[in-house]
Amino acid sequence: MSGRARLALCAAAATLMTSCALLPLVSPTTWLFQAAMLVAVVTGVGAATRRVPLARPLTLACQVVVALLLLTLVFARQQALAGFVPGPDAFQHFGELLQSGRDDVGRYTSPAPLTPGIRLMIVGGVLMIGVLVDALAVTFRTAAPAGLPLLALYAVATALSHGGADWVWFLVASGGYLLLLLAEGRDRLSQWGRVFTGAPRQGGGDSGGAVAPVRTGRRIGAVALGIALVVPLALPSLRGGLLDGTGAGVGAGLGDGNTISAVNPLVSLRDSLNVDQDRQVMAYRTNTDDTQDMYLRIVALDDFDGTTWKPAQRHITSVPDSFPTPTGLAGGVRRTEIETRISAADWYAQDWLPMPYPATSVKIKGSWRYEPVGRTLVGDHGQNTRGVQYDVKSLIVQPTAEQLADAPEPSASLKREFTKVPSSLPAVVAETARRVTAGSSNHYEQAVKLQDYFAVDGGFTYNTQVQVGTGPNAIARFLRDKQGFCVHFSFAMAAMARTLGIPARVAVGFTPGSPQADGSMSVGLRDAHAWPELYFEGVGWTRFEPTPNRGSTPSYTQSNTPTGEIPVVPRPSLSSSTAPSTAPSASESCSAALRKIEGCPSQSSQIAAGSGDDGPPWYRVLLWALLGLVLVAVPLTPMLWRLRSRSVRLASAQHAPSAQPLARVRRRDRGGERYADEIGMTVLPGETASSRATEVAVGHTLAVWRELTDTAWDYGIAPDDALTPRKAAERIVRLGRLDPETAGSVHRVAGAVEQVLYAPEPRSETGLVDDVRKLRVSLRSTAGRRTRLRAIVAPPSAMRAVWAAGDRWADLRTRWATRWAALTRRPSEQQGG
């Protein structure tokens, strides 16, 4: 096996060894065998294209194209042309699989089931990493940077894993990387010349000088790996390092010990309204009959970047025995404290703890932390809500319309933080907000008009079949089309409120749920909801309900509420019926066929503020990009082949052995190995150093001559194989009208060719590469612009690639015909009878 083939094999092995870090995340682990087969095919394609040889960018392009064809064959066979050529339908199917895979990643905890979407994400990711590692380590001969994609793959695996055996996968991954480095080192040593080893030295010393560097590299790698494993264990202060699978933060992400860095809760709530059968998320009992405002709030999304809303990174503390008074709540606002016992389903895993807002105390077992700004609890180091039971004390706040209307301005710091609007937000959002709230005398009237605009008199409809894209124009599109679901409405109202100077954020959680016969309340997946919260000094964060036909409209925002009177809390609404939630859901308007292919729109974070570009689908853009790449690459193929052939020929000639060492080799065949090693020459089994030196000299000189004749061909002087080298040189000098110095260079190359072909003792000349370059400069300086352009973009000598391919095909057909004839020959013919 050649050094480059061994290096390619080690690159594939390093990729698969690193991908083993993904094994704890998904069950079953059969995806690894599939990924191994695809990586092996792509590695073989790289080896074949390098053997041709193709230019390095073309080698990488071939591997990428083959990888795409393999993924199409495995994951989109029915949607592809001829079963493996991707078309628009195949790219659309890829998009649907990736979307479902992303949903599944947020829905399941480790180990997640191997759904089609997750399988595409893992296998496709490993395959792309394999292509990058092979390209860096083998094609471009830089194995050290190949560790970057391997590190990225390992980092993703450890970031998602909560297991305690991550050090095992670190050993496997680092072992694969060290194997790759050692293979490259061995390959580089082999290029210096053959390692000649004689009899062992006295005293048991090493017999080969090149063996020592290899052994030293192994020892250094082993020591470095040991240090990486032992030092973090010996220094307790080094937490959250490479071997720490969960980090030192809270939630499922990374962070330090005092900050929240968890996954957006909308990911786990995605598609909750689209389920075929409502599934209970949690059940609770409370000591009040006024359950219509018992929204179970998970978390508040207060970071708005113009594209989406997400929870800001906040400092957290230990869970206090009792929470402080809610921010902004004054003593004159009526409130009632209630107690609620909540039991989460044993399948429901959420980083944040659903609670009525505002909670005043929580009793819960497990590892939880408290975030004061949002008054939320978040799991620490993998803690989630799966099967937990907890008691919550919370307030039912009952402000009057007058109290809200008379609310003073909030503090400058709070207003500055919660009224941020990015410059990318379309101007139509602020213009619509000002138009809808025209004539309002305070922020409360503006908030009520915004709510009524969406829920009552704005012409909006609740529709889960809305087609949405991505981009900063999402809210503008929602305001234009006037169709969407709860996250559209809440995101849009919160953004519009901020443009009016009203502090706003979006809350995510569940509506109160449905009463049961035993007096408890049942909260299902279809009760998932999002709503805006607006801040009023003296009352605090206040819920509004802009989504039509969902949840309940707060009594303090209803126009028939007497000013200055305590609002009468209405009885439970239709969301508290004895049947599952009757609120419109995506499953009621989405066919079974669409649900089967996951074609129904989802309740995700990519709505209202995260969607809305009117551009073409991404798969169509990708298809056109691939077609454009093909249209550009095909015409440039002759140029790339010519550049590659020139570099190979001249590089080999530069390493040709000089005449003096060759003479020394001929005089001392018994010691020729030593001199062969000095000039970097490999001696094959059964050869002598002198015969091998002669063969190398002839090959290098003929390569230079071929490059000289091809250079002349590119500039209009076609080769004539019937001429001797001397006559051919005279013809090139005459037709090219070369100056005496360049003519001397051409004749010097021709003389070197005749010398190695016909002289009794061939010798290698030096400086031939410079002679060829001098010819190219001279021809280019005298040629016209059209000839120079043709010599670069469409060189005529590139026809040699076509001829070589034809010769290989004919040779292959001859060999197969010979083998077939031998297999089908009759026994009598084989015996000669």
Image (cartoon, rainbow, N blue to C red):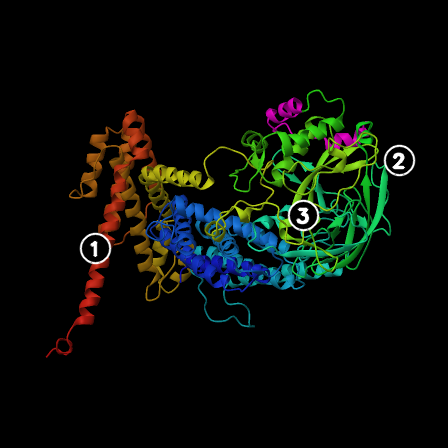
Identity of the residue drawn at 21% across and 42% down:
725
> What distance separates the C-alpha of mark 1 from that of mark 3?
77 Å
Q: What range is drawn magenta here?
A: 409-436
Figure quadrant of residue 666? bottom left
How many badges with numbers are in the image? 3
Q: Position of residue 626 (x, y in %)?
A: 40, 41
Of 46 and 430, nearer the camera is 430
Residue contact at pointers 2 and 1, CB within 8 angstroms: no
Task: Give the CA separation, mark 3 to mark 2.
Answer: 31 Å
Query: Disc 1 on helix, strand or loop?
Result: helix
Image quadrant holding the N terminus, namely bottom left
Name which of mark 1 and mark 3 comes first in the sequence. Answer: 3
For this view, does 342 lie left or right of residue 219?
right
Left or right: 691 in relation to 486: left
Residue 611's spot in the image, x, y percent?
Answer: 56, 37
Tag 2, which secondary structure?
A: loop
Q: Quadrant of residue 563?
A: top right
Q: Say which mark, if any, is on residue 332.
A: 2
Residue 810, which numbered label? 1
Specify whether residue 353 is in view. yes
Kind of residue indicated by mark 3: Ser
- Please check the rendered image and state whether residue 419 is part of the magenta-colored stretch, yes or no: yes
Amino acid type of the residue that numbered disc 1 sits on in the rendered structure = Ala
- Checking the image for residue 575, the label placed there is 3
